[in-house]
Amino acid sequence: MTRFAALALALLPATALAQPVNLAEKVAAGDRAKYTLGLELKGELFFVQDGKKESLPLEAKARIAFAERVLAVADGLPYATARHYAEAGATAVVGADRGTRALPTDRRLVVARRGADGLLCFSPAGPLTRDELDLVAEHFNPQCLAGLLPGKVANVGDTWTVGPAAAEAACLFDALVKAQLTGKLTAVKDGVATFTIEGTAEGVENGARATATVTATGTFDVAAGRVTELKWTQKDEREQGPVSPASKIEATATLTRESLAELPKELADAALAKVPAGAVPAALTHLRHADPRGRYEIVHPRDWHATGETGEHLVLRLIDRGEFVAQATVTAWRKAEPGKHTPADEFKKAVAEAPGWKPEKVLAEGELPAGEGRWLYRVAAEGKMESQPAVQTFYLLAGPQGHQVAVTVTVPPDKQKAVGTRDADFVRGIEFGRK
């Protein structure tokens, strides 16, 4: 080699001499790893109040740590994984309000499954609360990691397109509309490959359309054949949805991944004995909501979303495939003597005089089955609510000790079929005296 050729090689950047690397992860059932996640989020929520557009600043931080075991694989990615959370906590400030969330010890084991409607997370121990669900389902989903790679040998400077399954999981969409996320191998040094992901994606979450702009950097251990670190920054613009305001948010998730030489006892076969192999029973996907004053607790399907709560009322909306179909207002009713309840005629008179409600035609009324020691009465009528056509169904549920709850379900006339019996089932999910 001439002196000039040697000099030219010496002046080249190290990446120019890097050998091609097999930028691929092989995912198999039984794989295990430990993840540590940090999340920082800032943005604004937008809403209309008294005819004026208003906004509230939003800031949040979260710290998540869990061990994960792959249970099943589909599309080259983990389809189902079991996670045991050693740490899961978040703080959020919206306007002047500050809140904290934490995962209780009896809900630390969580199963995460990818599906047609996005990520399904549930605890084999029983129903989660909405806040607990948000903690385990709204952080960056590492099930996408293998799909962020090209899955083949690459040279520095090579680019590739991230597939739809990985894009949907990484962006936390319930459904992906389209994605243009491009990966690029930027460097290889000392057995570590560095790559980037950039681009945009559009999807739907909780019935709201969202557009995401992504900038991410990751490292890949060539010898181990796996992603070890990832910093994922996502700028979201979300339209107003049936259960959420419009928003502009920038979130950065920082992830580290470590190999586990041994399977933790919390993820051993004995610990996962209650995890269903096939369809997940509805009882495990339900959520629970406890009245802050301890008067009642509701276990309900996830398509009911709480949108507001005061000392006297809880408001939930029923969302069917992204569309609003009904609203339920839960009110603690005055307590009766043990074994008794408010007379039906008295309840009927009260609901007929409800503010803003003008009943026109009674559709149904009478008692419904509610379980031993419980009494359930229903009045359903067509009419107008604040001058708008509506069907309202009023329920009064009484427990054995005289505790009572009234539930008003308001449905647009064209959505009655979509509601079916889901409102009555919701009311039957109310329990008394659990606190």
Image: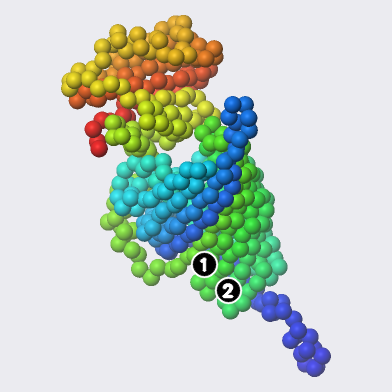
Under mark 1, the amino acid is Thr
- Residue depicted at x 44% and y 52%: 90
Under mark 2, the amino acid is Val
Mark 2 vs 1, N-terminal side? 2
Taking depth in this image into account, of 71 and 393 the one nearest to the observer is: 393
Q: Position of residue 171 (x, y in %)?
A: 57, 49
Say few, some or many: other residues with alpha carbon within 10 Å of mark 1 (under 14 / 14 to 19 / 20 or more): some
Q: Is residue 95 left or right of residue 129?
A: right
- Residue depicted at x 63% and y 54%: 214
Answer yes or no: do the residues labelled 2 and 1 have beta carbons within 8 Å?
Answer: yes
Is residue 203 visible in the rendered image? The answer is no
Taking depth in this image into account, of 107 and 73 the one nearest to the observer is: 107
Q: Secondary structure at mark 1?
A: strand
Taking depth in this image into account, of 347 and 380 the one nearest to the observer is: 347
Q: Position of residue 193 (x, y in %)?
A: 60, 71
Q: Quadrant of the C terminus?
A: top left
Q: Quadrant of residue 346?
A: top left
Is residue 200 visible in the rendered image? The answer is yes
Q: Quadrant of residue 404?
A: top left
Q: Is residue 411 above or below residue 434?
A: above
Q: Quadrant of the N terminus?
A: bottom right
Q: Position of residue 36 (x, y in %)?
A: 45, 62
Q: Which residue is mark 2?
A: 192
Q: Which residue is mark 1?
A: 228
- Way the structure is coloured: rainbow
Query: What separation in Å lies between label 2 and label 1 (alpha carbons)?
Result: 9 Å
Say few, some or many: other residues with alpha carbon within 10 Å of mark 2 (under 14 / 14 to 19 / 20 or more): some
Disc ID at residue 155: none
Q: Secondary structure at mark 2?
A: strand
Taking depth in this image into account, of 240 and 282 the one nearest to the observer is: 240
- Residue depicted at x 39% and y 46%: 132
Q: How many marks?
A: 2
